[in-house]
Protein backbone atom coordinates (compact mmCIF):
# COMPACT_ATOMS: atom_id res chain seq x y z
CA UNK A 1 0.00 0.00 0.00
CA UNK A 2 1.31 3.44 -0.92
CA UNK A 3 1.70 5.39 2.30
CA UNK A 4 1.99 8.77 0.51
CA UNK A 5 -1.27 10.70 0.71
CA UNK A 6 -0.27 13.22 -1.96
CA UNK A 7 1.17 12.99 -5.46
CA UNK A 8 4.65 14.53 -5.41
CA UNK A 9 4.28 15.86 -8.95
CA UNK A 10 0.95 17.72 -8.76
CA UNK A 11 0.25 17.85 -5.01
CA UNK A 12 -3.26 16.46 -5.31
CA UNK A 13 -4.42 13.65 -3.04
CA UNK A 14 -2.84 10.48 -4.34
CA UNK A 15 -6.29 8.94 -4.74
CA UNK A 16 -7.24 11.73 -7.16
CA UNK A 17 -4.14 11.52 -9.35
CA UNK A 18 -3.86 8.82 -11.97
CA UNK A 19 -0.09 9.26 -11.99
CA UNK A 20 1.45 12.33 -13.55
CA UNK A 21 5.05 11.88 -12.40
CA UNK A 22 7.71 12.32 -15.06
CA UNK A 23 10.97 10.46 -15.00
CA UNK A 24 13.17 13.52 -15.31
CA UNK A 25 11.39 15.80 -12.85
CA UNK A 26 12.25 15.90 -9.15
CA UNK A 27 9.35 15.81 -6.67
CA UNK A 28 7.63 19.20 -6.47
CA UNK A 29 5.13 18.60 -3.65
CA UNK A 30 5.35 17.16 -0.17
CA UNK A 31 4.04 13.60 -0.13
CA UNK A 32 2.71 14.15 3.38
CA UNK A 33 0.82 17.44 3.08
CA UNK A 34 0.82 18.31 -0.64
CA UNK A 35 2.59 21.65 -0.11
CA UNK A 36 4.90 22.87 -2.82
CA UNK A 37 8.53 22.07 -2.07
CA UNK A 38 11.55 24.31 -2.33
CA UNK A 39 13.73 22.17 -4.59
CA UNK A 40 17.43 22.71 -5.13
CA UNK A 41 18.73 20.90 -8.20
CA UNK A 42 22.48 20.57 -8.69
CA UNK A 43 24.49 18.72 -11.34
CA UNK A 44 24.77 15.62 -9.17
CA UNK A 45 21.53 15.56 -7.21
CA UNK A 46 18.55 17.39 -5.75
CA UNK A 47 17.00 18.20 -2.40
CA UNK A 48 13.33 18.96 -1.65
CA UNK A 49 12.28 20.88 1.45
CA UNK A 50 8.76 21.34 2.78
CA UNK A 51 7.98 24.36 4.95
CA UNK A 52 6.06 22.05 7.29
CA UNK A 53 8.14 18.88 7.21
CA UNK A 54 11.69 20.01 6.48
CA UNK A 55 13.84 18.01 4.06
CA UNK A 56 11.53 15.37 2.62
CA UNK A 57 13.35 14.07 -0.42
CA UNK A 58 16.90 13.89 -1.71
CA UNK A 59 18.86 12.13 -4.41
CA UNK B 1 0.38 31.22 -7.05
CA UNK B 2 -1.23 28.07 -5.69
CA UNK B 3 0.50 25.42 -3.63
CA UNK B 4 -1.19 22.67 -5.58
CA UNK B 5 -1.57 22.43 -9.31
CA UNK B 6 -3.73 20.42 -11.64
CA UNK B 7 -1.64 18.26 -13.96
CA UNK B 8 -1.39 19.43 -17.53
CA UNK B 9 -2.07 16.92 -20.26
CA UNK B 10 0.85 16.72 -22.65
CA UNK B 11 0.24 15.20 -26.05
CA UNK B 12 3.47 13.92 -27.53
CA UNK B 13 2.96 14.49 -31.22
CA UNK B 14 6.41 14.73 -32.77
CA UNK B 15 6.47 16.34 -36.17
CA UNK B 16 8.68 18.49 -38.33
CA UNK B 17 8.62 22.28 -38.21
CA UNK B 18 6.39 23.97 -40.76
CA UNK B 19 8.03 24.69 -44.09
CA UNK B 20 6.88 26.38 -47.25
CA UNK B 21 9.24 24.43 -49.50
CA UNK B 22 9.04 20.77 -50.57
CA UNK B 23 11.89 18.40 -49.67
CA UNK B 24 14.70 18.05 -52.18
CA UNK B 25 14.75 15.00 -54.43
CA UNK B 26 17.41 12.45 -53.36
CA UNK B 27 19.85 13.36 -56.14
CA UNK B 28 19.48 17.09 -55.42
CA UNK B 29 20.05 16.42 -51.74
CA UNK B 30 23.27 14.53 -52.49
CA UNK B 31 24.47 17.42 -54.64
CA UNK B 32 23.66 19.95 -51.94
CA UNK B 33 25.52 17.96 -49.29
CA UNK B 34 28.55 17.51 -51.58
CA UNK B 35 28.59 21.24 -52.31
CA UNK B 36 28.48 22.00 -48.59
CA UNK B 37 31.35 19.58 -48.03
CA UNK B 38 33.45 21.37 -50.63
CA UNK B 39 32.67 24.77 -49.13
CA UNK B 40 33.31 23.85 -45.50
CA UNK B 41 36.16 21.35 -45.77
CA UNK B 42 38.01 22.25 -49.00
CA UNK B 43 37.38 25.97 -49.41
CA UNK B 44 37.02 26.35 -45.64
CA UNK B 45 34.38 29.00 -45.91
CA UNK B 46 31.04 29.43 -44.19
CA UNK B 47 27.91 28.48 -46.08
CA UNK B 48 25.69 31.21 -47.42
CA UNK B 49 22.17 31.55 -46.08
CA UNK B 50 20.85 30.14 -49.39
CA UNK B 51 23.13 27.11 -49.19
CA UNK B 52 22.03 26.41 -45.65
CA UNK B 53 18.36 26.81 -46.60
CA UNK B 54 18.81 24.20 -49.32
CA UNK B 55 20.33 21.75 -46.82
CA UNK B 56 17.33 22.27 -44.54
CA UNK B 57 15.19 20.72 -47.28
CA UNK B 58 16.99 17.40 -47.63
CA UNK B 59 14.59 14.48 -47.14
CA UNK B 60 14.60 12.47 -43.91
CA UNK B 61 16.50 9.69 -45.70
CA UNK B 62 19.45 12.08 -46.21
CA UNK B 63 19.64 13.25 -42.58
CA UNK B 64 22.31 10.65 -41.67
CA UNK B 65 24.47 11.95 -44.55
CA UNK B 66 23.92 15.51 -43.37
CA UNK B 67 24.88 14.46 -39.85
CA UNK B 68 28.03 12.70 -41.08
CA UNK B 69 29.15 15.87 -42.84
CA UNK B 70 28.40 17.93 -39.73
CA UNK B 71 30.60 15.59 -37.67
CA UNK B 72 33.46 15.96 -40.15
CA UNK B 73 33.05 19.74 -40.09
CA UNK B 74 33.11 19.76 -36.31
CA UNK B 75 36.35 17.74 -36.27
CA UNK B 76 37.95 19.90 -38.95
CA UNK B 77 36.95 23.26 -37.44
CA UNK B 78 36.99 22.50 -33.70
CA UNK B 79 39.02 19.35 -33.11
CA UNK B 80 38.08 16.16 -31.30
CA UNK B 81 37.61 17.46 -27.76
CA UNK B 82 34.26 17.64 -26.01
CA UNK B 83 33.69 20.32 -23.37
CA UNK B 84 31.75 19.27 -20.29
CA UNK B 85 29.88 21.79 -18.15
CA UNK B 86 27.73 21.73 -15.05
CA UNK B 87 24.99 24.29 -14.41
CA UNK B 88 23.27 25.44 -11.25
CA UNK B 89 20.15 27.48 -10.66
CA UNK B 90 21.49 29.64 -7.84
CA UNK B 91 18.33 31.75 -7.63
CA UNK B 92 15.21 29.88 -8.73
CA UNK B 93 11.79 31.07 -9.84
CA UNK B 94 10.00 34.36 -9.31
CA UNK B 95 11.33 35.83 -12.55
CA UNK B 96 9.34 38.86 -13.73
CA UNK B 97 9.79 37.96 -17.41
CA UNK B 98 7.19 35.89 -19.27
CA UNK B 99 9.30 33.58 -21.45
CA UNK B 100 6.52 31.17 -22.41
CA UNK B 101 8.68 28.06 -22.15
CA UNK B 102 9.98 28.74 -18.66
CA UNK B 103 8.71 27.21 -15.43
CA UNK B 104 10.55 29.90 -13.44
CA UNK B 105 8.44 32.80 -14.64
CA UNK B 106 6.26 34.41 -11.97
CA UNK B 107 3.69 34.98 -14.71
CA UNK B 108 2.69 31.31 -14.79
CA UNK B 109 1.30 28.91 -12.19
CA UNK B 110 3.94 26.18 -12.28
CA UNK B 111 5.13 23.66 -9.69
CA UNK B 112 8.49 25.42 -9.34
CA UNK B 113 8.66 27.30 -6.06
CA UNK B 114 10.73 30.46 -5.94
CA UNK B 115 13.78 30.23 -3.70
CA UNK B 116 16.34 32.91 -2.81
CA UNK B 117 19.97 33.09 -3.85
CA UNK B 118 21.78 30.01 -2.54
CA UNK B 119 24.47 30.60 0.01
CA UNK B 120 28.12 30.35 -0.89
CA UNK B 121 28.57 26.86 0.55
CA UNK B 122 25.70 25.49 -1.53
CA UNK B 123 27.06 26.99 -4.74
CA UNK B 124 30.54 25.75 -3.92
CA UNK B 125 29.25 22.23 -3.22
CA UNK B 126 27.56 22.14 -6.64
CA UNK B 127 30.75 23.39 -8.30
CA UNK B 128 32.75 20.66 -6.59
CA UNK B 129 30.24 18.08 -7.85
CA UNK B 130 30.79 19.48 -11.34
CA UNK B 131 34.57 19.38 -11.07
CA UNK B 132 34.45 15.78 -9.86
CA UNK B 133 32.66 14.84 -13.10
CA UNK B 134 35.58 16.02 -15.21
CA UNK B 135 33.95 19.25 -16.29
CA UNK B 136 35.90 22.40 -17.10
CA UNK B 137 33.06 24.91 -16.92
CA UNK B 138 30.50 25.76 -14.23
CA UNK B 139 27.64 28.12 -14.93
CA UNK B 140 25.84 30.02 -12.16
CA UNK B 141 22.33 30.78 -13.40
CA UNK B 142 19.89 33.26 -11.89
CA UNK B 143 16.19 33.62 -12.73
CA UNK B 144 16.14 37.40 -13.02
CA UNK B 145 15.42 40.02 -15.66
CA UNK B 146 18.87 41.38 -14.98
CA UNK B 147 21.10 41.67 -11.94
CA UNK B 148 20.39 44.40 -9.39
CA UNK B 149 23.27 45.81 -7.36
CA UNK B 150 22.89 43.26 -4.56
CA UNK B 151 22.91 40.41 -7.07
CA UNK B 152 25.95 41.86 -8.80
CA UNK B 153 27.73 41.90 -5.46
CA UNK B 154 26.88 38.25 -4.80
CA UNK B 155 28.03 37.17 -8.27
CA UNK B 156 31.29 39.07 -7.97
CA UNK B 157 31.86 37.52 -4.56
CA UNK B 158 31.14 33.97 -5.77
CA UNK B 159 33.06 33.87 -9.04
CA UNK B 160 36.63 34.02 -7.66
CA UNK B 161 35.74 31.68 -4.79
CA UNK B 162 34.36 29.01 -7.14
CA UNK B 163 37.21 29.44 -9.61
CA UNK B 164 39.95 29.31 -6.99
CA UNK B 165 38.42 26.47 -4.96
CA UNK B 166 37.63 24.19 -7.92
CA UNK B 167 39.85 25.26 -10.82
CA UNK B 168 36.75 25.52 -13.03
CA UNK B 169 36.09 28.28 -15.50
CA UNK B 170 33.08 30.13 -14.17
CA UNK B 171 30.23 31.22 -16.41
CA UNK B 172 27.25 33.32 -15.37
CA UNK B 173 23.71 33.70 -16.70
CA UNK B 174 21.88 36.58 -15.05
CA UNK B 175 19.73 38.10 -17.76
CA UNK B 176 19.97 41.48 -19.40
CA UNK B 177 23.14 43.47 -18.65
CA UNK B 178 24.09 47.09 -18.96
CA UNK B 179 27.42 47.86 -20.53
CA UNK B 180 28.88 48.72 -17.13
CA UNK B 181 27.63 45.49 -15.56
CA UNK B 182 29.26 43.52 -18.37
CA UNK B 183 32.53 45.33 -17.72
CA UNK B 184 32.37 44.58 -14.01
CA UNK B 185 31.63 40.90 -14.59
CA UNK B 186 34.50 40.64 -17.05
CA UNK B 187 36.83 42.38 -14.59
CA UNK B 188 35.54 40.07 -11.87
CA UNK B 189 36.72 36.95 -13.67
CA UNK B 190 33.58 35.71 -15.43
CA UNK B 191 34.89 33.51 -18.22
CA UNK B 192 31.72 33.16 -20.27
CA UNK B 193 28.34 34.88 -20.06
CA UNK B 194 25.20 33.09 -21.17
CA UNK B 195 22.42 35.05 -22.82
CA UNK B 196 20.29 33.10 -25.27
CA UNK B 197 18.49 34.48 -28.29
CA UNK B 198 16.25 31.38 -27.98
CA UNK B 199 14.43 31.91 -31.27
CA UNK B 200 14.28 34.08 -34.37
CA UNK B 201 13.54 37.79 -34.07
CA UNK B 202 10.41 37.28 -36.16
CA UNK B 203 9.07 34.68 -33.70
CA UNK B 204 10.32 36.18 -30.44
CA UNK B 205 7.18 38.26 -29.71
CA UNK B 206 5.16 35.03 -29.69
CA UNK B 207 7.39 33.69 -26.92
CA UNK B 208 8.33 36.72 -24.81
CA UNK B 209 6.40 39.96 -24.34
CA UNK B 210 8.18 41.55 -21.38
CA UNK B 211 11.38 42.47 -23.16
CA UNK B 212 12.54 42.96 -26.72
CA UNK B 213 14.85 40.95 -28.92
CA UNK B 214 16.98 44.05 -29.29
CA UNK B 215 17.68 44.01 -25.56
CA UNK B 216 19.06 40.51 -25.88
CA UNK B 217 21.22 41.54 -28.82
CA UNK B 218 22.55 44.51 -26.87
CA UNK B 219 23.52 42.31 -23.93
CA UNK B 220 25.35 40.00 -26.31
CA UNK B 221 27.26 42.99 -27.66
CA UNK B 222 28.16 44.19 -24.15
CA UNK B 223 29.47 40.75 -23.25
CA UNK B 224 31.77 40.54 -26.25
CA UNK B 225 32.88 44.16 -26.01
CA UNK B 226 34.27 43.53 -22.54
CA UNK B 227 36.08 40.34 -23.44
CA UNK B 228 33.91 37.64 -21.95
CA UNK B 229 33.15 34.67 -24.15
CA UNK B 230 29.55 34.82 -25.31
CA UNK B 231 27.37 31.78 -24.79
CA UNK B 232 24.23 32.37 -26.83
CA UNK B 233 21.78 29.57 -27.32
CA UNK B 234 18.68 28.39 -29.07
CA UNK B 235 15.51 26.63 -28.00
CA UNK B 236 13.84 24.63 -30.75
CA UNK B 237 10.32 23.28 -30.70
CA UNK B 238 8.28 26.33 -29.69
CA UNK B 239 6.26 26.35 -32.91
CA UNK B 240 8.78 28.22 -35.04
CA UNK B 241 9.04 27.40 -38.76
CA UNK B 242 11.99 26.08 -40.73
CA UNK B 243 12.59 29.57 -42.10
CA UNK B 244 12.63 30.96 -38.57
CA UNK B 245 15.19 28.39 -37.46
CA UNK B 246 17.35 29.42 -40.40
CA UNK B 247 16.79 33.06 -39.46
CA UNK B 248 17.98 32.26 -35.94
CA UNK B 249 21.18 30.69 -37.26
CA UNK B 250 21.88 33.91 -39.20
CA UNK B 251 21.18 35.96 -36.08
CA UNK B 252 23.52 33.79 -34.02
CA UNK B 253 26.21 34.26 -36.65
CA UNK B 254 25.82 38.02 -36.28
CA UNK B 255 26.49 38.01 -32.52
CA UNK B 256 29.58 35.78 -32.91
CA UNK B 257 29.16 33.48 -29.92
CA UNK B 258 31.92 31.24 -28.65
CA UNK B 259 29.28 28.75 -27.58
CA UNK B 260 25.77 27.88 -28.72
CA UNK B 261 23.82 25.68 -26.31
CA UNK B 262 21.13 23.87 -28.29
CA UNK B 263 17.98 23.24 -26.26
CA UNK B 264 14.87 21.34 -27.29
CA UNK B 265 11.59 22.26 -25.66
CA UNK B 266 10.71 20.15 -22.66
CA UNK B 267 7.11 21.33 -22.20
CA UNK B 268 6.68 22.51 -18.63
CA UNK B 269 3.35 22.14 -16.82
CA UNK B 270 1.62 25.45 -16.26
CA UNK B 271 3.47 27.36 -18.98
CA UNK B 272 1.81 28.51 -22.20
CA UNK B 273 3.92 25.92 -24.06
CA UNK B 274 3.01 23.15 -21.63
CA UNK B 275 1.04 21.30 -24.30
CA UNK B 276 3.47 21.79 -27.16
CA UNK B 277 4.61 18.65 -28.99
CA UNK B 278 8.14 17.47 -28.45
CA UNK B 279 10.57 17.76 -31.38
CA UNK B 280 11.01 14.39 -33.09
CA UNK B 281 14.33 12.61 -32.72
CA UNK B 282 15.33 12.64 -36.40
CA UNK B 283 14.16 16.24 -36.69
CA UNK B 284 16.47 17.10 -33.80
CA UNK B 285 19.41 15.35 -35.49
CA UNK B 286 18.71 17.31 -38.67
CA UNK B 287 18.86 20.60 -36.77
CA UNK B 288 21.92 19.72 -34.74
CA UNK B 289 23.65 19.07 -38.06
CA UNK B 290 22.33 22.29 -39.60
CA UNK B 291 23.46 24.36 -36.62
CA UNK B 292 26.93 22.86 -36.95
CA UNK B 293 27.02 23.46 -40.70
CA UNK B 294 25.82 27.03 -40.20
CA UNK B 295 28.10 27.73 -37.25
CA UNK B 296 31.14 25.59 -37.99
CA UNK B 297 33.53 27.04 -35.39
CA UNK B 298 31.31 27.34 -32.33
CA UNK B 299 31.16 25.17 -29.26
CA UNK B 300 27.79 23.49 -29.96
CA UNK B 301 26.50 22.19 -26.69
CA UNK B 302 23.88 19.59 -25.93
CA UNK B 303 21.59 21.32 -23.44
CA UNK B 304 18.07 20.88 -22.08
CA UNK B 305 15.48 18.56 -23.57
CA UNK B 306 17.83 16.12 -25.28
CA UNK B 307 16.74 13.20 -23.14
CA UNK B 308 13.05 13.41 -24.07
CA UNK B 309 13.68 14.53 -27.65
CA UNK B 310 16.46 12.23 -28.77
CA UNK B 311 16.01 9.29 -26.43
CA UNK B 312 18.17 6.51 -27.94
CA UNK B 313 19.59 8.88 -30.57
CA UNK B 314 21.59 10.92 -28.05
CA UNK B 315 24.76 9.18 -29.14
CA UNK B 316 23.97 10.06 -32.77
CA UNK B 317 23.82 13.73 -31.82
CA UNK B 318 27.42 13.48 -30.67
CA UNK B 319 28.36 12.45 -34.21
CA UNK B 320 26.14 15.10 -35.83
CA UNK B 321 28.08 18.19 -34.81
CA UNK B 322 27.80 18.44 -31.03
CA UNK B 323 31.11 19.03 -29.23
CA UNK B 324 30.02 19.94 -25.71
CA UNK B 325 27.42 18.89 -23.22
CA UNK B 326 25.80 19.80 -19.95
CA UNK B 327 26.45 16.96 -17.59
CA UNK B 328 24.04 15.82 -14.91
CA UNK B 329 20.98 17.82 -14.00
CA UNK B 330 19.64 21.04 -15.49
CA UNK B 331 18.23 24.07 -13.69
CA UNK B 332 14.93 22.63 -12.47
CA UNK B 333 14.76 19.27 -14.27
CA UNK B 334 16.95 16.21 -14.16
CA UNK B 335 19.31 14.92 -16.81
CA UNK B 336 20.45 11.40 -17.31
CA UNK B 337 23.23 10.27 -15.01
CA UNK B 338 26.71 11.71 -15.53
CA UNK B 339 28.02 8.14 -15.76
CA UNK B 340 25.88 7.53 -18.84
CA UNK B 341 27.24 10.60 -20.60
CA UNK B 342 30.84 9.94 -19.62
CA UNK B 343 30.50 6.34 -20.80
CA UNK B 344 29.06 7.58 -24.09
CA UNK B 345 32.06 9.86 -24.62
CA UNK B 346 34.43 7.04 -23.73
CA UNK B 347 32.68 4.65 -26.12
CA UNK B 348 32.95 7.25 -28.89
CA UNK B 349 36.62 7.85 -28.01
CA UNK B 350 35.89 11.54 -27.65
CA UNK B 351 38.35 13.17 -25.25
CA UNK B 352 37.08 15.69 -22.71
CA UNK B 353 38.82 19.02 -23.10
CA UNK B 354 38.59 22.78 -22.80
CA UNK B 355 37.40 24.56 -25.91
CA UNK B 356 37.57 28.14 -27.06
CA UNK B 357 36.45 29.83 -30.21
CA UNK B 358 38.68 28.70 -33.07
CA UNK B 359 38.24 31.31 -35.82
Image (cartoon, rainbow, N blue to C red):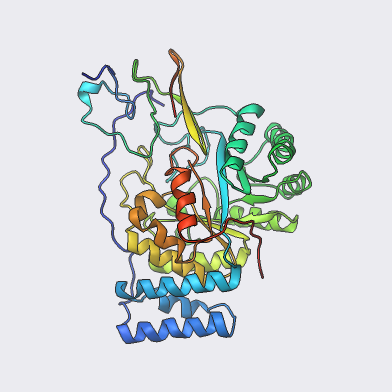
The total number of labels drawn is 0
Q: For the point 38% across and 36% down, which residue is it? A: A25
Q: Quadrant of the C terminus of chain B?
A: bottom right
The image position of residue B80, as x and y in percent, is 57, 65
Q: Residue B323 vs residue B181: left or right?
A: left
The quarter of the displayed image where residue B13 is located: bottom left
| Residue placed most toward the observer, B208 or B199 | B199
Counting from the top left corner in percent of width and height, residue B234 is at 49, 57
**From this viewpoint, is residue B32 visible?**
yes
Quarter assignment of residue B242: bottom left
Q: Which quadrant of the figure contains the N terminus of chain B?
A: top left
> In terms of depth relative to the viewer, which is nearer, B149 or B11?
B11
Left or right, residue B339 beside residue B309: right
Relative to B203, B295 lies left or right: right
Residue B162 placement (x, y as % from top left)? 69, 37
Outermost residue to the right? B187
**Residue at left offset 77%, top offset 43%:** B188
Q: Nearer the viewer, residue B109 or B57?
A: B57
Q: Is residue B143 visible?
A: no
Residue B64's place in the image compared with B161, above or below, is below
Report x, y in % for residue B131. 61, 42
- Identify which residue is drawn at 64% across, 59% down: B355
Amino acid sequence: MDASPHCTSCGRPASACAGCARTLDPPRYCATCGTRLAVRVSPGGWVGRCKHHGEVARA
Amino acid sequence: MSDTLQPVSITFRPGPAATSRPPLAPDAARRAIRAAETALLDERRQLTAAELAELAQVPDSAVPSLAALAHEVRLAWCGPEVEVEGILSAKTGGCPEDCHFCSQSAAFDTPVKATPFLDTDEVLAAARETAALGASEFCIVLAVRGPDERTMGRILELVPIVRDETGLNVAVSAGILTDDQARRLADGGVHRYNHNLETAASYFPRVVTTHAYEERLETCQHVRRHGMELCCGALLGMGESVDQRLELIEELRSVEPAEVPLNFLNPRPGTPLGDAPVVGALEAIRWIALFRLGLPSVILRYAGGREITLRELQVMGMTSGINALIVGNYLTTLGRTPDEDLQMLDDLRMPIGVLGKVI
